[in-house]
Image (cartoon, rainbow, N blue to C red):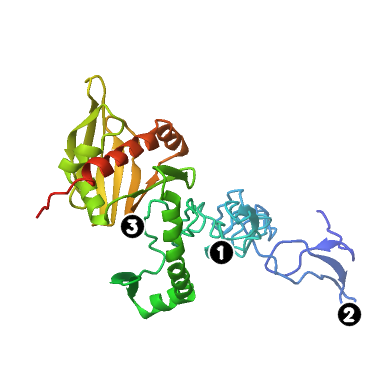
C-alpha cells in the first residue's frame, strides 16, 4: 500500500471544473488539514492546438479549421489566439497624380490607404482622377496659329464651336464721295451677345472700320502702276495683287465666263486653253487645262467652288490634275479703286515647300502675261451683253 503524502506548497488541481494544476497545497484555516488553492475553472478550450483545460484533449468540442494563413476576416485563421495580426497590403496606384500606399487590417476590415488617391478631374493638364487620361470630360478648344497676322487663327477658316456665334449682315450704299457701310448683328442669345461685347467686339469693329480706307489705299498703292506682284504673308500664304483697268463686274465676267477665259487666261504666248469647265454654284467643281501649241505639253488644275459673292469675292480649292496631296485655298477679291479694279488673290498652301515650288515655276510672270492680254484683248474691246 502506497501512502500519498501531501505537503503544503505542492502544486495541485482544486475542486474546479478543469483538470489543470493551477494551485498549491496549503493548510486549512483550522490547521486540521491541507487544502488546494485552485478554485478557478476559467480556462476555456479554444482552437489553438493546445489543451487549454488540461484534460489531455486538444480543441475538444470545437470545430476548428486552421489554415495556417491569416486573412482579414476577424477570425483566428492561423490558430495562434490572435485575430488579423500583422496584416498589411499595398494599395492605390501611381498613375497620374496618385501615389501608392498601404492598408492595415483591423477587425476584419481593411483600413484607409495611406497613399494619394484620385480627385475630381480638373482642366489643368493633369490626370487628377488617375485613369490615364488628362482633362477628359472638358471640351477641347482648338488653338490655331495666326499665320497671316490678322489676329485670328485657323487658316482653314473653320468655325470654333466653343466660341459664341453671331450673324452679321453687311449693307453697302454708294455715296457721292465713296460708300456707306452698315451692319446688323444677330446673336443666338443675350448671353452670347454679352460675352462677345465683353470680349471687345464693339471696340474691334470700330477699329476695323477705321482701317478700311487706309487698307484700300495701301492695296491700291501696292498694285498701282505695277505689273502683277506677289507678297509673302507667311510660310504658307502668298498674296498676288494687280490693278486691272476695268470695272469689278467686267473683271468678274472675265474670270467666270469660259469664252472670255479662253481668250486671256493663257499665261505666256504659245499656249491654249482647250478645257474650261467653270463652277457656277457653291459645291460645284471646275476643271481647267492648258496645252502648248506644239502639242508636246499639257497640264491643268481642278477644284471646288467654296464661296461666291459676285462680283466681288470667290473662294476655291485648287489642285494640279494627276498630282496627289492636299489642295491650295484661293481667295479672289475684286475691289473697285480709282483707275480700275484691285484684284487680290490670297493663296494658302498646305506647306512652305509647295509654296516655294509653285513660286519657282514663274507663276507671277505667267499671271502678268495673262492680265496684260486681259486688258488688251478682252477689256479693251466691248464685252457682249449676257442675260
Mark 2 or 3, nearer chain start = 2
Q: Quadrant of the C terminus?
A: bottom left
Kind of element beneath mark 3: strand
Of the residues tagged 2 and 1, which is closer to the observer?
Answer: 1
Image spot of residue 117 (x, y percent): 59, 60
Q: In this view, does 55 lie above or below 356?
A: below
Residue holding disc 1: 119
Residue at the image point whose x is 66% and y is 60% from the top: 114
**Left or right of 263: which side holds 355?**
right
Image spot of residue 301 (x, y percent): 27, 36
Q: In this view, does 186 lie above or below 48?
A: below
Residue holding disc 2: 30
Of 159 and 308, nearer the camera is 308
Kind of element beneath mark 2: loop
Image spot of residue 104 (x, y percent): 65, 59
Residue at the image point whose x is 31% and y is 40% from the top: 372
Q: Is residue 44 above or below residue 87?
A: below
Of the residues tagged 2 and 3, which is closer to the observer?
Answer: 3
- Mark 1 neighbour density, 10 Å: few (under 14) some (14–19) many (20 or more): few
**Res. 186 in view:** no
Amino acid at each position: 500500500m502506497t501512502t500519498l503524502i501531501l505537503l503544503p506548497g505542492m502544486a495541485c488541481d482544486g475542486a474546479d471544473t478543469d483538470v489543470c494544476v493551477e494551485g498549491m497545497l496549503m493548510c486549512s484555516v483550522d490547521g486540521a488539514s491541507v487544502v488546494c488553492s485552485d478554485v478557478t475553472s476559467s480556462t476555456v478550450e479554444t482552437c489553438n492546438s493546445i489543451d487549454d483545460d488540461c484534460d489531455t484533449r486538444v480543441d475538444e468540442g470545437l470545430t476548428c479549421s486552421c489554415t495556417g494563413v491569416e486573412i482579414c476576416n476577424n477570425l483566428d485563421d492561423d490558430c495562434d489566439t490572435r485575430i488579423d495580426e500583422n496584416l498589411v497590403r499595398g494599395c492605390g496606384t501611381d498613375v497620374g497624380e496618385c501615389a501608392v500606399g498601404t492598408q492595415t487590417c483591423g477587425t476584419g476590415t481593411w483600413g484607409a490607404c495611406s497613399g494619394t488617391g484620385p480627385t475630381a478631374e480638373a482642366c489643368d493638364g493633369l490626370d487628377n482622377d488617375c485613369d490615364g487620361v488628362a482633362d477628359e470630360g472638358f471640351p477641347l478648344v482648338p488653338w490655331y496659329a495666326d499665320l497671316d497676322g490678322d489676329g485670328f487663327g485657323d487658316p482653314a477658316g473653320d468655325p470654333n464651336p466653343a466660341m459664341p456665334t453671331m450673324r452679321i449682315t453687311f449693307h453697302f450704299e454708294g455715296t457721292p464721295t465713296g460708300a456707306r457701310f452698315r451692319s446688323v448683328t444677330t446673336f443666338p442669345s443675350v448671353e452670347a451677345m454679352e460675352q462677345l461685347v465683353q470680349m471687345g467686339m464693339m471696340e474691334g469693329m470700330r477699329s476695323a472700320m477705321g482701317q478700311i480706307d487706309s487698307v484700300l489705299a495701301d492695296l491700291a498703292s501696292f498694285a498701282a502702276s505695277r505689273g502683277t506682284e506677289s507678297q509673302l504673308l507667311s510660310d504658307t500664304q502668298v498674296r498676288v495683287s494687280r490693278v486691272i483697268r476695268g470695272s469689278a463686274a467686267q473683271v468678274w465676267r472675265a474670270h467666270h465666263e469660259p469664252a472670255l477665259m479662253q481668250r486671256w487666261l493663257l499665261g505666256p504666248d504659245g499656249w491654249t486653253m482647250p478645257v474650261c469647265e467653270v463652277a457656277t454654284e457653291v459645291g460645284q467643281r471646275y476643271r481647267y487645262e492648258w496645252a502648248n501649241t506644239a502639242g508636246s505639253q499639257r497640264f491643268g488644275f481642278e477644284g471646288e467652288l467654296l464661296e461666291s459673292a459676285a462680283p466681288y469675292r470667290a473662294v476655291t480649292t485648287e489642285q494640279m490634275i494627276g498630282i496627289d496631296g492636299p489642295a491650295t485655298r484661293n481667295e479672289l477679291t475684286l475691289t473697285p479703286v480709282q483707275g480700275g479694279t484691285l484684284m487680290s488673290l490670297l493663296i494658302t498652301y498646305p506647306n512652305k515647300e509647295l509654296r516655294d515650288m509653285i513660286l519657282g515655276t514663274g507663276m507671277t510672270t505667267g499671271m502678268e502675261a495673262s492680265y496684260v492680254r486681259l486688258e488688251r484683248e478682252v477689256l479693251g474691246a466691248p464685252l457682249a451683253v449676257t442675260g
